[in-house]
Image: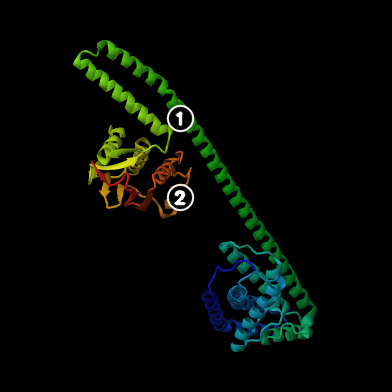
Amino acid sequence: MTGKNLFSPLSGLLLIFFSVAMIFLLEPWLFLVIDKIEASIINMNSSLLVLAAGLYSLIKTAAALPLLMGSLIISNEAVNKLFPDKINRYAEFAVNLMIIASIYYLVLLLTENHPGLYVPLIMTCFLFFTATPGHKKLWVIHRCTTTAQLLLGCYWLDLSPSLGAIGVGKDEVAVSMKLAATFLQSAAVMDFISMSFFIPLVAIAFITSFLINNHYKELKHMEKDKQRENQLQQYRLQLVQARSLQEMHSLVHDLKTPLTTINGLCSLLEMKYGQDAKNRQYFHRIDRSVQNMNEMISEILYENIKREITISDLINYVRAQLVPEKMEQQLEFNVENPDRIIKVNRIRFARAMINLVENALEATRDVKQGKIRIITRDMSEETCFSVIDNGVGISTENLNKIWITGFSTKNTSGLGLSFVKKVVEDHGGEIEVSSASGIGTTFNIRLRGEDDWLGKKS
């Protein structure tokens, strides 16, 4: 059966204990039913007998519903334990029926109630041969509604005088009611009323089951459609990102032509006007700037290019890229060992750091006394970069989704943090995040050093 592993055996036992309590609590109401039966005989009024029959069916259903639900939960758990691998459908049905019927009979016998022979059989057959959803909430709704409808129908069937000969309705109150119907010469009427309730209730149970199962199938289709849509969205974003990178690479590559021209013209001018010391200094600065620009272009075009740089120069480069205008938040830089040399792709790594700082600025935009701290720590075999803010934080639900390409809670492209993660991993490092809603967020980047490029001192 479906709906496995949704409840523990303890919840099933609690339902059974609740059912036992209900049996004793509802006992006074059964005396009221007996009083109605006696009143119908004294007054020769079959209408009172029908009223007593309805009350009897409701009382028995209220007491038996938690018993059968608890038995069903225990049965499902027992099948899972006994048969961890999938078994034959009919063997599973037989085991479920045996467990449910055993619990049902045992509880009713211990409480001195006559167990109906067919109640667990009808219920188990119905729930077995009608597909049931695996969704937890729908499983509860499906079982409760259909079981209640079937029980109500079964207890009406208990009151049919014609079916007494085959063992249906041997409960003391049910027998008394059928004898009263015979005495009042209303046996045929009671048969008709019993069937008039039993058949529609069973039909309604089937319709209810069908509607719930269809609803569940629609939910599954909707979830699959949503997953496909999310995948398509990710593919679109990756395509846009790839195109953007390609165009950016083309544009950046095209910058090499004017830079080559500038460098050539600078050399010609230096040959003509380079005798003056001040002019030579200017030409040297132009040449150095062109070289720096070429290095930056190479780092943008080729991800694997890494150059040695001090941590202070890297942080200063990050600081220079941030626009301080209209910035109400406080930015705090704390560099533990500014002269430590690391080997990174300056453009890409700085861009990753800037993305983290810009996210922190956004998170603290509406926070009173918003503060962002950029900290570097010098460790024996690694360097740690931390971006800490006291902003709105990230919910636990979204914390594991932030690295997914395209995921965003602010209607942005959702490429920022996935880019940061890729850059860090390209440098052989790791990035971690910890956050709490309303408290703030901390991003830690750890670059593990290699003897040939990290840990040197200038």
- Tell me: 351 left or right of 192: left
Q: Nearer the viewer, residue 29 or 449?
A: 449
State the residue at coordinates (66%, 60%).
213
Measured as percent of width and height from the top left, residue 254 is found at 44, 23
- Mark 2 Cα-neighbour bin, 10 Å: few <14, some 14–19, many ≥20: few
**Callout 1: helix, strand or loop?**
helix
**Callout 2: helix, strand or loop?**
loop
Residue 49: image quadrant is bottom right
Residue type highlighted by circle 2: Lys
Residue type highlighted by circle 1: His
Q: CA distance from mark 2 to mark 1?
A: 29 Å
Measured as percent of width and height from the top left, residue 230 is found at 55, 45
State the residue at coordinates (53%, 36%).
239
- Tell me: 237 left or right of 336: right
Q: Along the polypeptide, which appears first: circle 2 or circle 1? A: 1
The quadrant in which the C terminus is found is top left
Residue annotated with mark 2: 401
Is residue 436 among what the camera can see? no
- Whether 296 is drawn above or below 43: the answer is above
Measured as percent of width and height from the top left, residue 388 is found at 30, 48
